[in-house]
Image: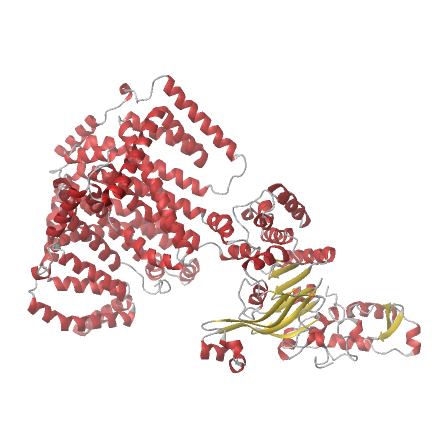
Amino acid sequence: MSTTTGTPASTPARTPAGPPGSADAVFSVDGLWKVFGPKAERVPADPELAALDPAELRSRTGCTAAVRDVSFDVRKGEVFVVMGLSGSGKSTLVRCLTRLIEPTAGAIVIDGEDVRAMDKNRLRELRRHRAAMVFQHFGLLPHRSVLDNVAYGLEIQGVGKAERREKAAEVVAKVGLEGMEQRRPGQLSGGQQQRVGLARALAVDPEVLLFDEPFSALDPLIRRDMQEEVIRLHHDEGRTMVFITHDLNEALRLGDRIALMRDGRVVQLGTPEEIVGSPADDYVREFVRDVPREQVMTVRTAMRAASAAEAARGPALAPDATVSEAIEVVARSGDPARVMDQGRCVGVVDSAALLGVVAGADTPAAGAPDGPRGEAA
Amino acid sequence: MATVTATVGHSGVSALLKNLRGHRAVGKLLLLAVVAAVIVPVLDSHWASGSWPGALTVDLSAPLGRASEWIIDNRDSHPLFLYFFGYVSSAVVLSVRAVYVVLLAAGWAGVTAVAALVAWRTAGVRLALGTAAAFLACGLLGMWVPTMQTLALMVVAVLASVLLGALLGLAAGLSDRTYRALRPVLDTMQVLPAFAYLLPVVLVFGIGVPAAVLATVVYAAPPMARLTALGLRDADAGVMEAVTSLGATARQRLLTARLPLARKELLLGLNQTIMMALSMAVIASVIGAGGLGDRVYQALASVDVGAALAAGIPIVLLAVVLDRVTGAAGERLGSDSGATAARWVYAAVSALAVALAGHLTGRLDWPASWTLSIAEPVNRVVDWMTNHLYSGVPYIGGTADWAGHFTTWVLDPVRDGLQWLPWWSVLLIVAALAWLIGTWRTALTAVLAMAAIGVLGVWKPSLDTLSQVLAAVAVTLVLGFATGIAAARSERVERLLRPVLDVFQTMPQFVYLIPVVALFGVGRAPAVAAAVVYALPAVVRITTQGLRAVDPAALESARSLGATGAQQLRQVQLPLARQSLLLAVNQGVVLVLAVVIIGGLVGGGALGYDVVFGLAQGDLATGLVAGAAIVCLGLMLDRVTQPTARTTKKGA
């Protein structure tokens, strides 16, 4: 699998992962542009301008295209990660979803409803009930207690004091801040403040949680805690999440699917395994070079067809077991391991195949188009 | 030898030019010189050099006199006065009287208790005790009634200023266009001396309490407006975005986020407005505000230092208490929570109890037997000083001698020099200075303001005022920079200076006239001395802060290269603190001008005297022209020293 053309899920921009507004898509983005600068609308409209690279565009028109022709679907219940370096347009992209930044062109659909066509009231309803955001710099109100910060979203919806405080207290407990309800944000550590930010977003019980680099301002240990918190929350509630990050490891840990952005474009969209196992271009390949592949790739990718003898015996593995788990099993038994899917042997992995993955050689068999997520941890 | 001096001279000049921002400065000066070479001969042939030519002045006294007479004639009949100014005027009188009556009804014990309890709730126990002591001291000095008069005027003026300022600030904080329109106006108002505001209100309202209150409101509202706008505009963008992302309406964003986020600025605005209102309420005694200021004014008129001091001390106490309590309220923001309402109720109830007790025991007025007359002993001390310190002290001379020498050797030559300069050369100097430090815009404003002074026909007195300002600024900067550098280099000096600066910075301008009259008598030198003392704290403080704020990494690297203390100061700290030092100069100039003008009350002469004279003689035309000249002079001095170079490009 040296190219990505055959796999719909990992096609770069232009062709969306599914038809816009498909049944299981919460957010559906199609051909989205955000251009900053004078007379920005002409850039997406003019194919010649749209094709220019950023430096040329700037010198010709004085405009900067932060998001260029981006299309994707966010499916219900998944963690959709948008990842890229600073200046790649990922933060602008997530703000376009609820029109905190007004997009220049393209379509955004939430549950079949056109976001760009919404009037002020509809848009406010969208922000109040359907999509809540967690920010890199928390955005807490410094003059309010933790409890009142968490209850803020309910307060502006007009929920009564007792009810919103009760709900807020519940969420505060859920994010592990019991006993700190009456503190002010200024008295909390960064990690605790971000828990308040997370609780504030959760308190309004939104359909989608949007995270804008929420853990970038935290130190590494706390960042890891918070990532686990998000994984746990997702596991418990199955809420749809859109997660923006510049940290590849964070993206691989959290993401069911990852859209990798560069200069405003999505250069590759796929599962962590696809991104690491079959980079779409040299940029992505360079990007994922240092990733420990055996922790991302699954045996489904590494396996080959089993001979009759092999299918009958040997240690069993689930198809979404990581290569590193398989190495452990194979090393211990000395035999190739069987990959068992619902009691049926779908293939085997032997030490040669596993070593191939670790060495970064192309894997023998093509991975499934919509492979299950790799357990990066 | 000759070549050596030549190169030294050359390098000295080039170093100087480099300091004036390199080639750009040379370019500006060359351009200005070319323009001057073309224009000056033309001007010179049309109108002679020397003082401002008579042909270029416009005599405004006749039309202004007519306008003032028309207003006086129509004050009781014209609908504008009947239905607008009349109502404003009576509303002001009524509200001041109402507050005054309430204050008297609360009695001295009640007022002291309320003040102390408010101070306790907002600023803590220590300041509550200080507040109580300050109010009792006012009574003890026999100044209870004037203090209450000043307080009544202050309460009304501060409420109106805060309301006006907050509304303007709200408009400017929420609308970019309003902000752009309002900012230059507020900036300019803040550099104008208090005296400039007196005449226009007197013209409309006549001398009396309404004029005093309105002048105070106009003077004190700008800081509130400025800081409100600033606070609202500076709201943390991340918080505002988060609030928007949760679906808050515009109203909710303003009420639950933008306004609360600006609390610090709002309280700072309140603090500054109160301080400026007090300062103006005292000065407005010249136009009919009663109370403490009036006592000082009357006492100064008869050079009765003792009586002036007895009224001056309550002013200072009031200023310090008001400043500390409102300042502490700002600092305590957000530190305590819960149970506040209950404590406020407790405070209110106990204050009411004290007031009622006073009422029932019939002790509302301050008991006459409890007063302490300090006028007599103070005057004896002053007399002794006059006899022993004024002159003839061996070796060092006396204070009056110093004042005399300063007048003869500094003020007179500077004044005569300025007045001797051809008028166009003054304009050229103004243009060159303003352009070198700022932009061509500031230079243009400065030149136009200076020319307007000539057109108004007050060239000579304005240059007299200017000479006093220059002398005072020179002294202020030498002392201020020296002290500032010392304080920046030594923690101990700074610790010693801080409380002194704190007190000096809160005192109203008017109060500074009292000690200088005691020391130097009347004349121009005492006016300059008062100006120096008034402007010094700000200059010292800005210098110290500027030097302290210098990037420690730069200093550390200089130290690591083995730079001596003096080298660090000269080569790192001073150049990096350039912006602060320029700001110190600007503030120094603005503050000095304010007091030099007020110096007209103690024999400073020039423009300040014209205003006082115009008010005293009912000759509003003279006063108004002098007031306009003060505005122009203030504008010119501010623009000449305004380092706006490239930093405010965005706002322009």
Which image quadrant is residue A24 in?
bottom right
Q: Nearer the viewer, residue A187 or A107?
A: A107
Q: Nearer the viewer, residue B271 or B89?
A: B89
In which quadrant of the rendered image does the N terminus of chain A lie? bottom right
Q: Which residue is farthest top?
A: B361
Horizontal side of residue A148 vs B349, given as left or right: right
Q: Would residue B587 be visible to someone looking at this image?
A: yes
State the scheme by which the image is colored: secondary structure
Q: Would residue B508 be visible to someone looking at this image?
A: no
Horizontal side of residue B594 vs A347, given as left or right: left
- At horizontal 16% and vertical 60% (from top left) the residue drawn is B451
Vertical arrangement, residue B87 with respect to residue B44, above or below:
above
In which quadrant of the rendered image does the C terminus of chain A lie? bottom right
Q: Nearer the viewer, residue A253 or B271?
A: B271
Horizontal side of residue A353 vs B390, given as left or right: right
Horizontal side of residue B316 vs A34, given as left or right: left
Total residue callouts: 0
Q: Position of residue B350 (x, y in %)?
A: 45, 25
Q: Nearer the viewer, residue A295 or B224?
A: B224
Q: Position of residue B537 (x, y in %)?
A: 30, 46
- At horizontal 36% and vertical 54% (from top left) the residue drawn is B546
Q: Position of residue A108 (x, y in %)?
A: 61, 68
Vertical arrangement, residue B606 with respect to residue A17, above or below:
above
Q: Position of residue B464 (x, y in %)?
A: 13, 52
- At horizontal 27% and vertical 52% (from top left) the residue drawn is B191
Which image quadrant is residue A88 in?
bottom right
Which image quadrant is residue A326 in?
bottom right
